[in-house]
Image (cartoon, grey):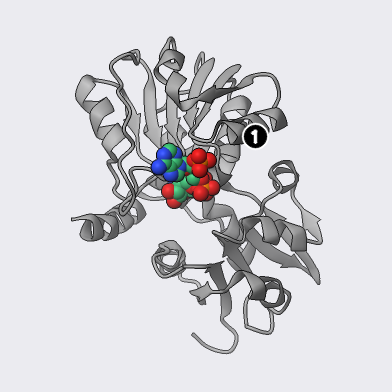
Amino acid sequence: MNGTSKGACVIGHPIAHSRSPMIHGYWLKQLGLEGHYNREDILPENFALFVRSLREHGYVGCNVTLPHKEAAFQLLDRASPRAQQLQVANTLWFEGDVLCGDNTDVEGFVANLDERAPQWDKNLKKAVVLGAGGAAASIIVGLQERGATDIRLVNRTYEKAEILAKRFGTSVHPTRWTELTDSFDDADILVNTTSLGMKGQAELDVDLDLLPLKTLVTDIVYVPLETGILRQAKQRGNPIADGLGMLLYQAVPGFEHWFGKRPKVTLELRALIEDNIKGLSA
Ligand code: NAP
């Protein structure tokens, strides 16, 4: 690091376990670029001030994660169409003095499936989405853009599914948790967007017996890499895709904005992060 080296960061609270520094550090090294990428643990009450003074802190831009994604959108001078659509931003950069922002989670979600389950969207019609939190909106948009015409949005708190479904049109059907397995009929894809199954959280307790064997099962939780629902799906013969690639692909546009080169999601990068995750989940 030196005085002319560009810097970026990820802002969140908590942020200690973020793998973004590993990802961007790998790309900086691989592309032979001078630069650095830090974690910044910022409380919600200090977030706006920190973002407004990003450049004084030596940063040309940042990623934003929980719990700041909505606040980040509110601070933008110019929001990408995607950020406007979702009303959240996870990637910020400057164009002159203009603070610009994008949401790259949709791109990350679909790019991961394109890589891990090629042709997943061929004849895509029906999707079952578990969870109606912050990440679910991006998943719904990604599924709709790839052709899904019937999305069952299943959430523990039904009212939240209702509110979210209304934002995305009549193809999204809010569904009660107790009706989950009834929604499996003819599903092309099942996506877990709840935090269940993540290390430190309760298991996602879902019986897949009624799920068609053709249904692609994917989880956006990536610690552990193979969550309980993915293990269960694999054992009964369903195709599966884990969520690590979503994290890797959503990082690409930010790196390009800040450091001027579009990085690649390589097998080597994936292996690096996998090793880190496996070390922690062992
Ligand atoms: P969030 O806004 O907090 O939403 C959490 C969701 O999980 C809600 O739908 C919530 O249901 C549900 N949930 C939590 N505990 C539950 C329980 N005991 N039983 C049933 N449902 C429960 O979180 P988020 O931002 O959407 O993120 C969700 C997960 O996705 C996190 O693990 C996050 O790390 C992961 N993620 C991964 C990527 C990636 O790049 N791969 C990107 C974004 C997020 P209620 O509405 O009923 O509370």
| Residue at the (39%, 45%) spot, across then down | 221
Residue 79 at what x, y percent from top left? 76, 53
On the question of residue 37 being in view, the answer is no
Q: Quadrant of residue 208?
A: top left
Residue 65 at what x, y percent from top left? 55, 59
SS for dot 1: helix
Q: Is residue 215 left or right of residue 90?
A: left
Residue 179 at what x, y percent from top left? 45, 19
| Residue at the (54%, 15%) spot, across then down | 125
Which image quarter holds the C terminus?
bottom left
Q: Quadrant of residue 118?
A: top left
Residue 158's place in the image compared with 70, above or below, is: above
Q: In this view, which residue lies farthest toward the top?
A: 186
What residue is disc 1 on?
164
On the question of residue 238 being in view, the answer is yes
Which residue type does callout 1 highlight?
Leu
Q: Is residue 270 left or right of residue 247?
A: left
Q: Quadrant of residue 74?
A: bottom right
How packed is label 1: few (under 14 Cα within 10 Å), some, or many (20 or more)? many
| Residue at the (39%, 33%) spot, across then down | 218
Residue 270's place in the image compared with 158, above or below, is: below
> Mark 1 near ligand 1 (CB under 8 Å)?
no
